[in-house]
Image (cartoon, rainbow, N blue to C red):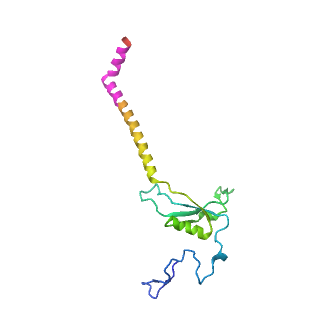
Amino acid sequence: METVQSSDIRSPTRTSGRPDNDNRPRVDEPALSMGRSVFPDGVTGRIYQPCRSAMTSAKPRKDWRLIFEPRTAPFIEPLMGYTGGRDTLTQVRLDFPTLEAAIRYAERQGLSYVVQAPSSGSQAKVSNRQASEERHAFSDVVWQRLQLAWLQASNNYGAGAQAAHIQT
């Protein structure tokens, strides 16, 4: 949280030029846990760029997310059947504006991390375009055959041609 000093509620002023949540040790405060991370040992983080929700037409997200991989397997609660777990760190989700900020945070905390590369949208668009072209080519052939069958049935063209073939 930022330190705000105010004599009047309408005009707050900052006493610090940087945000207070960057976890850098201050000169006037002791370091956290004697220089150790606040996260338990053996925690692995996964840094990825979340994709756009399928339920919206908004632009894709540009921020990066750090989540923690589960360290224990989930279990089924016997009375109610709920799925539970003893690893509460899997519920933590940290968002960062850039990939570099997420990596710096993980390294500063002493976390082992894995960066998951974002899926390239251009390749997905190209494959979707190729799939739609294949569908159109298939539907064009089917449509032409249906038109030919309708034309033959409406003019009795097919019946006469088959009868002439049988007589010879």
Q: Is residue 137 left or right of residue 104?
A: left
Residue placed farthest to the top in the image? Answer: 168
Q: Is residue 46 left or right of residue 119?
A: right
Residue 50 position within the rendered picture, expressed as x and y whole percent measured from the top left: 50, 59
Q: Quadrant of residue 47?
A: bottom right
- Which residue shows up at 63% across the image and 78% down it? 31
Task: Residue 105: say if magenta.
Answer: no
The answer to which of 39 and 8 lies nearer the viewer is 39
- Which residue shows up at 53% across the image and 63% down it? 65
Residue 149 position within the rendered picture, expressed as x and y whole percent measured from the top left: 36, 27
The vertical placement of 90 against 155, above or below, is: below
The vertical placement of 162 against 146, above or below, is: above
- Which residue shows up at 67% across the image and 59% down it? 72
Magenta residues span: 147-165
The vertical placement of 146 against 168, above or below, is: below
Task: Residue 156: say if magenta.
Answer: yes
